[in-house]
Amino acid sequence: MARRKGLSFYEKEKKINKATIHEIFSTLFYSLAAILLAFVLVSSVGMKVSMIGVSMEPALYNSQGVLINRFIYSITSPKRGDIVAFLPNGNKNSHYYLKRVVGLPGETIQIIGGYVYIGGELLEEDESFDKIADPGMAENEVVLGSDEYFVLGDNRNNSEDSRSGNIGAVKKETIAGKVWFHLSCEEEGMGLVK
């Protein structure tokens, strides 16, 4: 019988052995364990809230979900530029407000000509923030206490924030945590908050 010349293909019967089964179950186990650990960490040191309103656009959009790190401020204090979640005046019946920290404890804040001044010096800020039309109670100097922060929305002319008499300076004890991650919405995908 003559042998055929050229390429020939043989199908080898593949066998599933114990090592392959062990590898599949190990991968599934570790994946599920990682998901469970992530869920436990987020729910124990964090929380999820939704942005209400347009006051933080374009950083955060109306009804966009965000994750809050509740643990970070137990070891450190809020920094200028952080976006924080807080209950206005500690009102537990209110929704969480999300605003950017502008003034730190002990500082003097004033809005002059649409711009924020801290201790008489112009605050260097991102040019994307609008010139402030209504300085509210920050038209006069606002002296922050040792545990108070001055917060503003990024959409400066559509925000109820520390300029408003019903919110005013935010006490550290009313701050739930730092906004660190935003979930996807119609306007953008998910990612870290800047």
Image: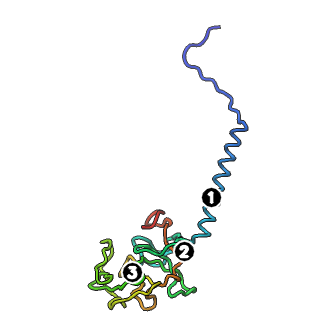
Instruction: Kindly identify the residue that appears in the image at 70 percent across and 33 percent down.
Output: 15
Whole-number angstrom distance, CA of label 3 to CA of label 1: 38 Å
N-terminal label among 1 and 2: 1
* For marks 3 and 2 on the same chain, the one whose residue lies earlier in the sequence: 2
Single out the mark in the foreground, 3 or 1.
3
Horizontal relation, residue 65 to residue 37: left or right: left
> CA–CA distance between discs 1 and 2?
25 Å
- Badge 2 is on which residue? 74
Residue type indicated by callout 2: Ser
Helix, strand or loop at label 3? It is strand
**Above or below, 46 relative to 166:** above
Amino acid at circle 3? Gly
Q: Nearer the viewer, residue 182 or 85?
A: 85
In the rendered image, the vertical position of residue 139 relative to residue 17, given as above or below: below
* Chain-order first, disc 3 or disc 1: 1
What label does residue 141 carry, if any? none
- Location of residue 55 in the rendering, given as x and y in whole percent from the top left corner: 41, 78
Q: Where is residue 50 in the image (x, y as percent from the top left)?
A: 52, 74
Label of residue 103 in the image = 3
Q: Position of residue 78 (x, y in %)?
A: 46, 75
Q: Could you give the CA–CA distance between mark 3 and mark 2, rounded to whole angstroms?
A: 19 Å
